[in-house]
Image (cartoon, grey):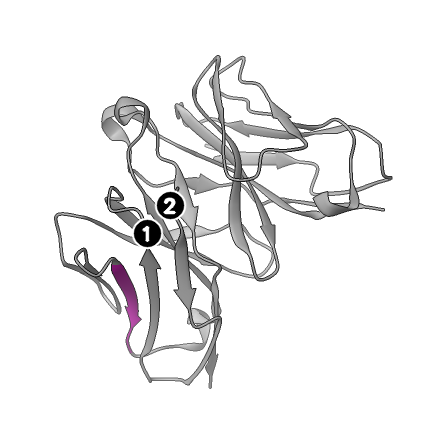
Amino acid sequence: NAGVTQTPKFQVLKTGQSMTLQCAQDMNHEYMSWYRQDPGMGLRLIHYSVGAGITDQGEVPNGYNVSRSTTEDFPLRLLSAAPSQTSVYFCASSYSGQRAHNEQFFGPGTRLTVL
Amino acid sequence: GENVEQHPSTLSVQEGDSAVIKCTYSDSASNYFPWYKQELGKGPQLIIDIRSNVGEKKDQRIAVTLNKTAKHFSLHITETQPEDSAVYFCAASALHHGGATNKLIFGTGTLLAVQP
């Protein structure tokens, strides 16, 4: 199993540009989520999904969109990038339902810089 | 919503000493408390977790304690080694959507440095 994969590893954008951060998992996990990590602020939840077709907002959803058309993929879209979105982004997945509160597996992260 | 506070933000210990990291949470409905270790340039990895029906859990040199009345939980690492140097995060979670979600709220992290 590849686990949780994220692409790209690094990205530089100009203010106002759009892009999609890709996340995929091959563990058949129902639950997937996106976090951003900023110095001194830990990991903050952006959006999450409990299954295909179901998404919900986390702590800091503004400026980000998500969709979940398949169990495996959970892309994060920035429609108009802002310097405040400069951060490291992590995708995570786990089982849910009766197997909720099992380990969340994190991807290697995407480092995004918005100029 | 849930709020998790973590202290200290940095911790330096000598190899062989013990390290303790403390977290408090605000939502009394939280019932799952994992700890993650993040090495430089990598994603966080689960090292130990505890559920609300247990007061303490051990795994070799690592232990976690939970005090539900006071709403705090702690990570204890004994006989520290240089490879324990990393950032450690606590988190709290309560089941939502009828038990479907595993939404974690993280603390701000502790940078642990183990000096040889």
Discs 1, 2 touching: Cβ within 8 Å = yes
Label 1: which secondary element: loop
Where B74 sits versus A85, above or below?
below
Q: Which residue is mark 1?
A: B26
Within the image, what quadrant is residue B18 found in?
Answer: bottom left
A50 or B41: nearer the viewer: A50
Q: Which residue is mark 2?
A: B2
* Residue B51 placement (x, y as % from top left): 20, 47
Dominant SS in magenta? strand
Mark 1, chain letter? B
Dot 1 alpha-carbon crowd within 10 angstroms: few under 14, some 14 to 19, many 20 or more: some
Q: What's the residue at 27%, 44% (across, down)?
A: B30
Q: Is residue A63 magenta?
A: no
Mark 2, chain letter? B
Quarter of the picture holding the N terminus of chain A? top left
Upstream in sequence: badge 1 or badge 2? 2
Q: Is residue B71 left or right of residue B8?
A: left
Q: Mark 2 belongs to which amino acid?
A: Glu
B47 or A39: nearer the viewer: A39
Question: Rounded to the nearest whole Å, what is the CA distance between mark 1 and mark 2?
Answer: 6 Å
* Residue B91 placement (x, y as % from top left): 37, 51
Q: Which residues are magenta?
A: B72-78
Where B37 sits versus B29, above or below?
below
Q: Mark 1 belongs to which amino acid?
A: Ser
* Residue A60 placement (x, y as % from top left): 57, 39
Which label is found at residue A53? none
Q: What's the residue at 51%, 14% (across, down)?
A: A70
Q: Is residue B114 left or right of residue B93?
A: right
Label 2: which secondary element: loop
Q: What's the residue at 79%, 28% (across, down)?
A: A18
Where B8 sits versus B4, above or below?
below
Within the image, what quadrant is residue A36 found in?
Answer: top right
